[in-house]
């Protein structure tokens, strides 16, 4: 997977947390996903199609999901409920949407976000994709961003367009 595909998501995540939540996050070392990578309690998932295709997973600890949703909705939330699930879906959508803008030559379409909750849930990527895992820490708890994209038949055209746009 190329850095030009990953960096827009990393920048978008940091910017979204800073501007929407007024919460700074600190990224740990990037790594390839393996079988030992577990998600946090609440995960927003969004699919992308175009010259590259795959999905992005924003996984939040319970404490972070609750605080983020409380901040977005300007009310104190104490349980993972429909409001928290909707807020995590919206955060995932914001991160993917802003990254999509930076990946213009790839003509990406983003799907509707889905949210999975529960301890030790697993999100499976297509077998041909090895996702990049970006762990983060925040004052409200840990989070992880996983990006798994693969080139499609249109990717050579998009890559040439991206290079000529620079």
Image: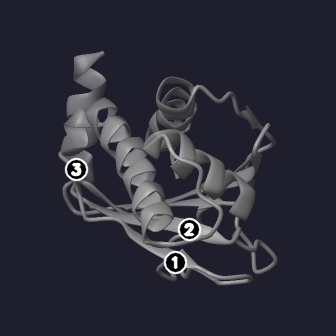
Front-most of residues 127 and 135: 135
Q: Is residue 59 left or right of residue 61?
A: left
Inspect this view and state whether residue 61 appears: no
Query: Total label count?
Result: 3
Q: Could you tell me which secondary element the residue under label 1 belongs to?
A: strand
Q: Quadrant of residue 104?
A: top left
Going from N to C along the chain, the mark reached first, 3 or 1, is 3
Q: Residue at x 59, y 63 (%)?
A: 131
Mark pair 3, 1: CA separation? 23 Å
Residue 87 rendering spot, x and y as whole percentages:
44, 55
> Which residue, given by chain and number where applicable, does mark 2 sit on?
43
Q: Quadrant of residue 130?
A: bottom right
Residue 135 rendering spot, x and y as whole percentages:
74, 50
> Which residue, given by chain and number where applicable, does mark 3 sit on?
108
Q: Residue at x 68, y 72 (%)?
A: 41
Residue 152 rendering spot, x and y as whole percentages:
28, 63
Going from N to C along the chain, the mark reached first, 2 or 1, is 2
Q: Is residue 35 left or right of residue 4?
A: right
> Which residue, given by chain and number where applicable, does mark 1 sit on?
116
Front-most of residues 148 and 156: 148
Q: Could you tell me which secondary element the residue under label 2 belongs to?
A: strand
Mark pair 3, 2: CA separation? 22 Å
Q: Quadrant of residue 33?
A: bottom right
- Check disc 2: other Cα within 10 Å, few if <14, some if 14-19, many if 20+: many
Asked if the residue at tag 1 contacts the one at tag 2, i.e. Cβ–Cβ closer than 8 Å, the answer is: yes
Going from N to C along the chain, the mark reached first, 3 or 2, is 2
Q: Nearer the viewer, mark 3 or mark 1?
A: 1
Q: Residue at x 34, y 35 (%)?
A: 98
Residue 6 rendering spot, x and y as whole percentages:
51, 43
Q: Could you tell me which secondary element the residue under label 3 belongs to?
A: loop
Asked if the residue at tag 2 contacts the one at tag 3, i.e. Cβ–Cβ closer than 8 Å, the answer is: no
């Amino acid at each position: 997977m190329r850095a030009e595909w990953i960096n827009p998501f990393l920048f978008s995540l940091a910017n979204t947390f800073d501007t929407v939540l007024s919460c700074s996050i600190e990224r740990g070392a990037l790594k390839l996903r393996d079988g030992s990578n577990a998600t946090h309690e609440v995960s927003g998932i969004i699919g992308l199609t175009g010259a590259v295709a795959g999905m992005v997973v924003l996984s939040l600890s319970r404490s972070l999901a609750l605080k983020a949703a409380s901040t977005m909705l300007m009310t104190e939330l104490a349980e993972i409920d429909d409001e928290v699930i909707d807020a995590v879906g919206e955060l995932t959508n914001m991160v993917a949407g802003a990254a999509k803008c930076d990946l213009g030559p790839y003509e990406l379409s983003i799907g509707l976000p889905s949210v999975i909750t529960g301890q030790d849930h697993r999100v499976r990527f297509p077998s041909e994709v090895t996702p990049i895992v970006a762990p983060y820490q925040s004052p409200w708890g840990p989070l992880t961003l996983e990006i798994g994209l693969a080139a499609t038949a249109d990717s050579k055209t998009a890559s040439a367009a991206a290079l000529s746009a620079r």
